[in-house]
Image: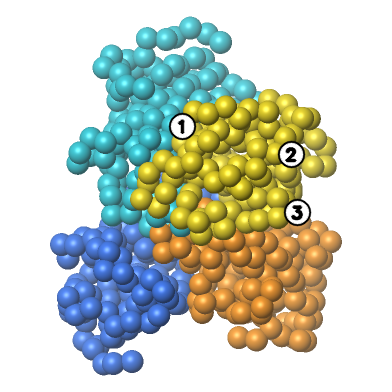
Chain colours: A orange, B cyan, C blue, D yellow
Amino acid sequence: MNVPTDRYVSEATFYVRYAETDTMGIVHHSAYLVYCEELRSQYARDMGTNYAEFEKEGLALAVSEVHMRYLVPVVYGQRVTVRGWVVEAKSRRITFGYQIVDPDNGTVHATGTTSHICVTRAGQVARIPEHWMELWDAGSSSKEEI
Amino acid sequence: MNVPTDRYVSEATFYVRYAETDTMGIVHHSAYLVYCEELRSQYARDMGTNYAEFEKEGLALAVSEVHMRYLVPVVYGQRVTVRGWVVEAKSRRITFGYQIVDPDNGTVHATGTTSHICVTRAGQVARIPEHWMELWDAGSSSKEEI
Amino acid sequence: MNVPTDRYVSEATFYVRYAETDTMGIVHHSAYLVYCEELRSQYARDMGTNYAEFEKEGLALAVSEVHMRYLVPVVYGQRVTVRGWVVEAKSRRITFGYQIVDPDNGTVHATGTTSHICVTRAGQVARIPEHWMELWDAGSSSKEEI
Amino acid sequence: MNVPTDRYVSEATFYVRYAETDTMGIVHHSAYLVYCEELRSQYARDMGTNYAEFEKEGLALAVSEVHMRYLVPVVYGQRVTVRGWVVEAKSRRITFGYQIVDPDNGTVHATGTTSHICVTRAGQVARIPEHWMELWDAGSSSKEEI
């Protein structure tokens, strides 16, 4: 999966944490989901807001699907850059794409996608409010309904 | 710290999880706090209830202090037994003690204590309801007020 | 994805841990990967061994791909049963399938697959030793080479 | 515990991650240990090196004791600043002190200490090499032997 050139791509760079590694001496595969989540937080901040504001409106983006490919292990001592973008923004569902790379030499460590359904606190599927859709929709060409 | 003989001691035994290990090849020190938390969950289940019920009453036991001593590392492939008991139960605060051992050979891997303050959802300190205090108080000799 | 009837299916049942939940009040999606990993540990134990033995042979099963669908959230206080089986066992790669259900009412919470490449400590791809392949191959119908 | 003025104090500021929160809607107490660990990583980087280098010398700093006080909960959407310093540096053991604060308003969320024993890969206690001791000793007044 390549990073798209036709829409906004958010980026976050940080050192991996020792606690994220395992006995194999590499970052545990579950930590990549946390990195992708942190990228979504960064995306919202890039747009001048905070995902905490979304939840204050009584909504949440529940993860409905995750697909991750692990290409080259990441080790402690290393920094990673997570890049993320909106693959598809529908009225009730949004899909993000990711690339996790070494910011120093460009090695691609992993790629993936996550899909999210907008739900109320009671767990009911809901439309993503217009002012949020505008953020995630920025640069995305897919606006069809589900 | 020895396991007390004058009060109820709850026990939970499980295999450590690969994700809990780190590059040193041992269980990460933060995982022990999760083990102790799981023991508190087990304690409530031993008493015929579930800590989820406590939260349904609009209350929570917020962790106010943690003290843990790590004696012998735990490695993947191993089971641990967590033993836990009430050190002190006051009207608004409860302290648990723990011992984490190898169930097969008795090796003591760690000991510790955690203290908890009863709070409402709004974060206000609150009295622990009587019917919960009775559970945690069982066998404890310290019932003075704070 | 349905649980297959033509091969061995391992099962592990446990209470979800409080630390695995998030602000939405549900188990975080990354925890499911840890549940699946624990199922793989259980699978090895079911076969009379321990994945730790695999690593003692200087090998590891590095996660190369993860695909997870989240259907119904899991909340604290609940038990889950993870079922797992070998989807495909090749000479250097093995794929597991999973179903995560509520053992009390059968609700399917999530389904998924994980793929693993056999690697040496130096990170080189290696053949899975015959005596291990026999375990994972048990009941699987796919034995072609990659 | 106050931040000392007579020795080096390292600092790391970051947003808390959604995965670190729990059903109470606050950052889980075990995450603070990971924050402190990340501060120790930052401390080594401040000194122009990386803790990964320490491990390349066949050594590790195993956590032997943790003491943490939780004063004010941290919520998602918030940044924290972790400050850390060397409380005591002995030939085989080092103790760090921490303060976790809100960088925007100065609220002290938590304070704590962690102690570490220098061990070889085989788990034997070892002297901290001189060139590492110099880093951690910088500004510390306690240099007595254990």
| Residue C47 x, y percent position in the rendering | 17, 65
Q: Residues within 10 Å of mark 1 (few under 14, many from 20)?
A: many
Residue type at the position of mark 3: Glu
In which quadrant of the rendered view does residue A50 lie? Answer: bottom right
Residue wearing tag 3 = A53
Instruction: Reply above or below: A25 against C135.
Output: above
Task: From the viewer's perspective, tell me whether residue C113 is left or right of residue A21.
Answer: left
Q: Residue at x 78, y 61 (%)?
A: A45
Residue type at the position of mark 2: Val
Q: Are marks 2 and 1 on the same chain?
A: no
| Residue A47 x, y percent position in the rendering | 82, 65
Instruction: Reply above or below: B85 against A25.
Output: above
Quarter containing the N terminus of chain D: top right
Q: Residues within 10 Å of mark 3 (few under 14, many from 20)?
A: few
Chain containing mark 3: A
Q: Residue at x 41, y 19 (%)?
A: B87
Q: Nearer the viewer, mark 3 or mark 2?
A: 2
Element type at mark 2: loop
Residue B70 in view of the camera: yes
Element type at mark 1: strand
Residue C19 in view of the camera: no
Query: Which residue is nearer to you in this view: A105 or A70?
Result: A105
Disc marking residue A131: none
Residue type at the position of mark 1: Met
Element type at mark 3: helix
Q: Residue at x 30, y 18 (%)?
A: B4
Q: Are marks 3 and 2 on the same chain?
A: no
CA–CA distance in space, label 1 to label 3: 36 Å
Residue wearing tag 1 = B68
Task: From the viewer's perspective, tell me whether residue B40 is left or right of residue C40.
Answer: right
In which quadrant of the rendered view does residue A11 lie? Answer: bottom right
| Residue D8 x, y percent position in the rendering | 74, 38
